[in-house]
Image (cartoon, rainbow, N blue to C red):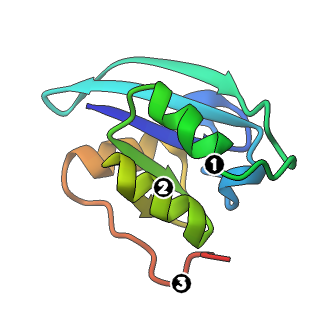
Amino acid sequence: MIIAISSDGGGLDGQVAMHFGMCSEFVIVETKEKQIISSRVLPNIHSGKRIPGALPEFIKTQGADVLITGGVGPKATELFNSFGIQVVLVQNQKVRAVVSDFLNGRLKADENACVH
């Protein structure tokens, strides 16, 4: 399974970004049997540009099965759903912690997260 997490910097030790499109980077985590196999950090080259569909397509090309972020708009969510990518919204959490909690079934989606 591949999990993409929007981050404000710091890779696995960073904070989950509160706004998907405005994050500084994406942490792409490959997992197997509830363990992190590898991770890589990719800069958000579209940050702040608001190019409709560009970021969901970018996450899709990374092979992501899941996106974890602090907030994402309805159009991007629709695209992720059409790509078969699960979107999980969280607030104020570290990247490594949300990956671990997700893999172990402990991650609780935040119903109050930003869905601008």
Q: Nearer the viewer, residue 81 or 94?
A: 81
Amino acid identity at mark 2 = Leu
Q: Residue at x 67, y 41 (%)?
A: 54
Q: Which residue is mark 1?
A: 53
Left or right for 105, reference 24: left
How much space separates mark 2 and mark 1, taking CA atoms?
A: 7 Å
Task: Specify whether residue 86 is in view.
Answer: no
Q: Which mark is residue 90?
A: none
Whichever of labels 2 and 1 marks the residue nearer the N terminus, that label is 1
Q: Label 1 is placed on what type of residue?
A: Gly
**Does dot 3 land on a helix, a strand or a loop?**
loop
- Which residue is label 3 attached to? 112
Image coordinates for residue 59, horizontal then vertical, percent:
52, 36
Residue 61 seen in the current view: yes
Q: Are marks 2 and 1 in contact (CB under 8 Å)?
A: yes
From the image, which quarter does the N terminus lie in?
A: top left
Amino acid carrying label 3: it is Asn
Query: Cα distance, mark 1 to mark 3?
Result: 24 Å
Q: Give the mark nearer the N terminus: 1 vs 3.
A: 1
| Front of the two marks 1 and 3 | 1
Q: Note whether 90 is above or below 63 in the view shown.
A: below
Outermost residue, left side: 33
Judge left or right: residue 14 versus residue 45: left
Mark 2 lies on a secondary structure that is: helix
Is residue 106 depicted above or below 111 in this figure? above
**Contact, CB < 8 Å: mark 2 with mark 3?**
no
